[in-house]
Image (cartoon, grey):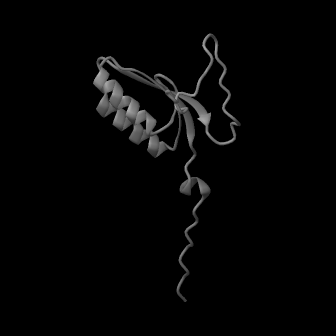
Amino acid sequence: MASRPTPLVLRPSTLFPMRTTYIVTYDISDAKRLRRVLKICRNHGDHLQYSVFECDLAPAEKIKFETELKDAINGLEDQVLFIELGPAEGRGDRVISALGQPYIDIDAPCYVF
């Protein structure tokens, strides 16, 4: 009698890897590289402040993001920091408090009259 093949079991963690939230911030010394890094970061997260983004990334997305940034910066002059905040799931709503100038969503629409 032929044995039955073992069924393939896909776990949710295999289909949807855990996402982690990062604060990504940068200090870029050249205007052309700065524009390129800004564009790359906008493709991966939410713009919080001039050089600060919040990004929810799966492991493969983080590797892709880091690779794009490595290709865009000068490692001797520029710096990009990834600050890990923990799992993206179950953290609740984002709460941002500010000292000094109030926090304003940079990506909010701007109307000029």
Q: Percent x, y for residue 101?
A: 60, 13
Q: Residue furthest front?
A: 113
Q: Please tell me which residue lies in front, 41 or 103.
A: 103
Q: Percent x, y for residue 98?
A: 64, 17
| Residue 75 relative to residue 83: left or right | left
| Residue 30 relative to residue 108: left or right | left
Q: Residue at x 57, y 28 (%)?
A: 105
Q: Residue furthest top?
A: 100
Q: Percent x, y for residue 94?
A: 66, 32
Question: In terms of image quadrants, where is residue 1?
Answer: bottom right
Would residue 92 be visible to someone looking at this image? yes
Q: Residue at x 34, y 20 (%)?
A: 78
Q: Residue at x 60, y 59 (%)?
A: 11
Q: Is residue 103 above or below residue 86?
A: above
Q: Please tell me which residue lies in front, 10 or 73.
A: 73
Q: Percent x, y for residue 87?
A: 62, 38
Would residue 74 be visible to someone looking at this image? no
Q: Residue furthest bottom?
A: 1
Q: Is residue 58 above or below residue 111?
A: below
Q: Is residue 17 above or below residue 111?
A: below
Q: Residue at x 51, y 44 (%)?
A: 58
Q: Please tell me which residue lies in front, 47 or 9.
A: 47
Q: Please tell me which residue lies in front, 69 or 8.
A: 69
- How many numbered marks, from 0 up? 0
